Amino acid sequence: MNKELERNKSYWRANLKIVSWLMVVWFFCSFGFGIIFSDTLDQYRVGGFKLGFWFAQQGSIYIFIVLVFVYVHLMNKLDRKYAKIEEKD
Amino acid sequence: MEVQELTYLFVGLSFAVYIGIAIWSRAESTNDFYVAGKGVHPVANGMATAADWMSAASFLSMAGLIAFLGKDGSVYLMGWTGGYVLLALFLAPYLRKFGKFTVPDFIGERYYSSFARKVAVLCLIFISFTYIAGQMRGVGIVFSRFLEVDINTGVVIGMGIVFFYAVLGGMKGITYTQVAQYCVLIFAYLVPAIFISILMTGNPVPQLGFGSTLVDSPVYLLDKLDQVTVDLGFNEYTQNSKSVIDIFCITAALMFGTAGLPHVIVRFFTVPTVADARKSAGYALIFIALLYTTAPAVSAFARMNLIDSIQDKEYSSAPSWFKNWEEIGLIAWKDKNLDGAIRYSSGDAVKGRPVYDTERGPSGERIVLNSPNSDNENEVYIDRDIIVLANPEIAELPGWVIALVAAGGLAAALSTAAGLLLVISSSISHDLLKKTYMPKITERQELFFARVSAAVAIAIAGLFGIYPPAFVAQVVAFAFGLAAATFFPVLFMGIFSKRLNKEGAIAGMLVGLIFTATYIIFFKFLYVDLNTSENWLMSISPEGIGFIGMILNFVVAILVSSATKPPPQEVLDMVEMIRQPE
């Protein structure tokens, strides 16, 4: 029982760590590049887009997709790791 | 074939498909009716979620809004997609693990309180009906413009279709119809966008096209648009005009609101496993992003085309779409300088929504009775909701593309309406009847009540369509603000905090609800004249105030919880259970 509790705790901590890092990226790519620093980024250009405008209307959305799939991948890995530990215990 | 015949054909075919699916996927149990037997494939659920989520507002209104707002319109793009990251990381997998039927179900059990459950049902019903009213307006617009039937007849037909598959099939029927509706709506959205992108920039990918140069010119489309908008006295297209803090708060309110919307959350109850719930959120976001990254391109194309095709044209030689939309009252022209030419610039042409005389003016236009605004030269009133529907006509695309867009708009409106009706009916039959007032009913009776409440909800939604309440546009801010200020914090902390208790959750929800509702009602209904940035709290508009409501909810919930006794052991065990994968 004690072992299980310990295992659950460390699984949850690992989960929180993954989620926190992803949220940092999430915040910077949307609220950061798309809103707060958007006007500053607008002095750079990618083709016909001003960079800040591109982040606000395109880039942030692409990054959101990548974030969710990175999360899916990392969590599946974590689940497999803990399933193995559980078998060993 | 004529456009109208094609439209009948496309709309008729798509409706036949929806009905076919409904017959094939009848619900046999409450498990089928509420959560589609938890057997939906993650990709199918991703598509269904995308159709569920993308409403008449996303399909018909959003690109038009952005076309007129320019960069300020980004709040919708980031807000309505960024919420899926929150949903995937914080809610979907855990609520799937919890494994019950509805969102109030989770709140009632996690906070061991039937009062909390009832507050949740109340918020859910309010949010969902607000939303449905918007869908019905969308159905009405499409029917009246393209099928030339009376708006009321159109609404009744739409209701009949939804009634058929929602009442018969419940979540199971809705899910598979939504998959079909997603295919129809995304095809209908992308085809004209690709056409227009090729026509204007030569690039077939709209996402790249609106960052390209114009055909026959070395000038970038967006630069041209910036220049033209400034010349006509509008805000520069790629510049914000709202304050940074307001944009920040509106985006946040839309994001957290999206993550807290019950009809979206409940979709993740339908997949087989926790891992599938995560994956499914990712697929949903891809399917949504396909439309959401195309929309700003459509906006830029439409704004450019719109200005090009009417500016300084004689009314007598104005394009036919201009006159068609004028006929149904969504465009108006007031010849202020009496020169017979259309002058389009910034500012409202007339005071209020146009009211037409029965007589025609000297150029053949419908006479507008409203008094003109004399502080600007603008002579044109354009309802923003028509941009997506009118865009193929403005760009002179073939008739079948126009017909396709009509079918797509209907798919978007009907799929969302069905999803909303389902959460309303299940919160009534499951949370209010089975779990609160009539715990002794059998599963068959519960299923019967679920069908009856779905039917009643459809009837009420139909009434909203036939007698559209004037407040529809104003209450959209309500739905998201309230979802953010009530549901998100208690759902999030119900999973991520073991300390949050009944007292904290109820106090938090009520404070979030009352604060947000008061602020919105004050500025949107009671003192509309005061609704300017000088009077706002920290210059945050009513659209963004849900974010502040959400922060208050968190603070109050934590403070009250720490002053009262912790949740009982069985609730702690439940939280521990939902945190672990299978």
Image (cartoon, coloured by chain):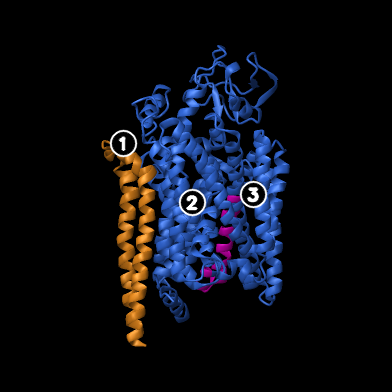
Chain (orange): A
Colour chain B is painted in: blue
Q: Main secondary structure of the magenta part?
A: helix
Residue topped by disc 3: B14
Task: Name the residue located 38 percent from the left edge and 44 percent from the top edge.
Answer: A58
Highlighted magenta segment, given as a residue range: B106-133
Judging from the image, mark 3 belongs to the subunit labelled B
Location of the N terminus of chain B (image quadrant): top right
Q: In the image shown, does B131 or B169 lie closer to the viewer?
A: B169
Q: Looking at the picture, which amino acid does disc 2 mark?
A: Gly
Q: Are marks 1 and 3 on the same chain?
A: no
Q: How far apart are the two marked residues, 3 and 2, measured between alpha carbons?
A: 34 Å
The relative height of residue B515 versus residue B65 in the rendered view (above or below) is below
Marker disc for residue A47? 1
Mark 2 surroundings: few (<14), some (14-19) or many (≥20) residues within 10 A: many
Under circle 3, the secondary element is helix
**Residue B196, percent across and down?**
48, 34
**Residue B43, percent across and down?**
49, 61
Task: Name the residue located 68 percent from the left edge and 77 percent from the top edge.
Answer: B440
Residue topped by disc 2: B481
**Residue B564, percent across and down?**
43, 72
Q: Looking at the picture, which amino acid does disc 1 mark?
A: Gly
